[in-house]
Amino acid sequence: MKNSNQSKPTHWSEPVHSLLREHQIKQVAMVPDAGHANLIRLCEADKKMKVVRLTSEEQGVSLLGGAWLGGEKGILLMQSSGVGNCINMLSLSTSCQMPLVILITMRGDHGEFNPSQVPMGHATETVLSAMGVLVRRGDTHEAVVEEVAGALHMAFNTSRPIAVLIGQKVTGAKDFRKLTH
């Protein structure tokens, strides 16, 4: 996917932000995450969106449930390590039949350096599926945009929770050697 003004590929966050605007997303709940940094900046600069910083990911599920009941659409941004914090709260969306779209940047995935990220990264899809969340995955910029478009449409039309996993092939794996030097 190329931006017509530039020769380098468009970052997935730009078309995803456009999709959020198109679907009238008003609230963006998130725990700060480097993988979502570009999207977070775009949402913070957007006067039609309110970005809410959470202290823990499960707060986003209830926040967005309240937003939906109040007539606003929202989205939850988190890293895969935060999925474990949400297990109990995810039942709210399925049992109350409220839409929930979660964009999850993966850790413990392609090229991971931190051994403590691997267990939850490996279990993320299984945990979400066990809680009734539909799971999609994007491992290219184009696939992320396509999966987010489908998730937004499906979640808000069928009142279901859907997560899009954004693989480390897209976000880039951190390198321990670069972090310590």
Image: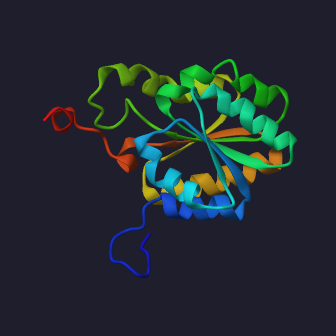
- Determine whether, in the image, residue 152 is placed left or right of residue 175: right
Residue at image position (68%, 18%) is 88
Q: Quadrant of residue 90?
A: top right
Q: Nearer the viewer, residue 76 or 172?
A: 76
Residue at image position (76%, 49%) is 73
Residue 149 percent across, percent down from the top left: 64, 57
Judge whether residue 159 can be spotted in this image.
no
Colour pattern: rainbow
Q: Which quadrant holds the C terminus?
A: top left
- Determine whether, in the image, residue 17 is placed left or right of residue 26: left
Residue 34 percent across, percent down from the top left: 40, 43
Query: With respect to residue 28, does 58 lie above or below?
Result: above
Query: With respect to residue 99, does 116 lie above or below?
Result: above
Q: Quadrant of residue 89?
A: top right
Q: Which quadrant holds the N terminus?
A: bottom left
Q: Nearer the viewer, residue 112 or 5?
A: 5
Judge whether residue 53 can be spotted in this image.
yes
Name of the residue lying farthest toward the left:
181
Query: With respect to residue 5, does 129 lie above or below?
Result: above
Q: Nearer the viewer, residue 51 or 141?
A: 51
Residue 3 percent across, percent down from the top left: 43, 75
Total numbered badges shown on the rendered structure: 0
